[in-house]
Image: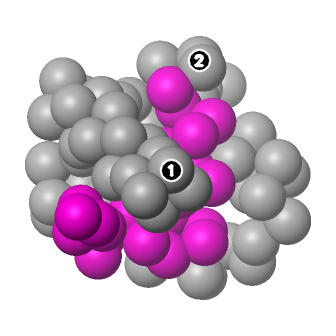
Amino acid sequence: MFDELDPILHSQLRLAVMSLLIGVREAEFTFLKEKTNATAGNLSVQISKLKDAGYIDVVKQFKDNYPQTICKITKKGIDAFEMYVSALQSYMNP
């Protein structure tokens, strides 16, 4: 009756990051940090978990001699997010 919720996405911060990336497809670390009000350390850990799951790609580069981290949602991440939303809907409409 109820679909299983993806444990990777069932974390508030990871879900927030994925929700932001669904809308913009890619974003800088600083943008995600500002929008989620997360600490840099916690956000970094959660981004690593999303990357390890294959839900996002992380590109580290330099821009004007400053490090820049860009997170991009993957096809697998889009599919997982859509399945998560569908699973949540099964809880709201049993």
Q: Position of residue 69 (x, y in %)?
A: 49, 43
Boundaries of the magenta span: 1-22
Task: Name which quarter of the figure residue 67 lies in.
Answer: top right
Viewed as shown, does residue 94 lie left or right of 34? left
Residue depicted at 53% across the width and 31% down the height = 21
Q: Position of residue 88 (x, y in %)?
A: 45, 55
Disc 2 marks a residue whose amino acid type is: Val
Task: Name which quarter of the figure residue 51 lies in.
Answer: bottom left
Residue depicted at 60% across the width and 82% down the height = 41
Tell which of 59 and 93 is nearer to you: 93
Task: Name which quarter of the figure residue 60 lies in.
Answer: top left
Tell which of 43 and 65 is nearer to you: 43
Q: Which mark is residue 21?
A: none
SS for dot 2: helix
Residue 2 seen in this snapshot: yes
> Badge 1: few (under 14), some or many (20 or more) residues near its Cα, within 10 Å?
few
Residue tagged 2: 24
Residue depicted at 50% across the width and 50% down the height = 93
Q: Is residue 68 magenta?
A: no
Q: Which mark is residue 93?
A: 1
Q: Position of residue 7 (x, y in %)?
A: 29, 76
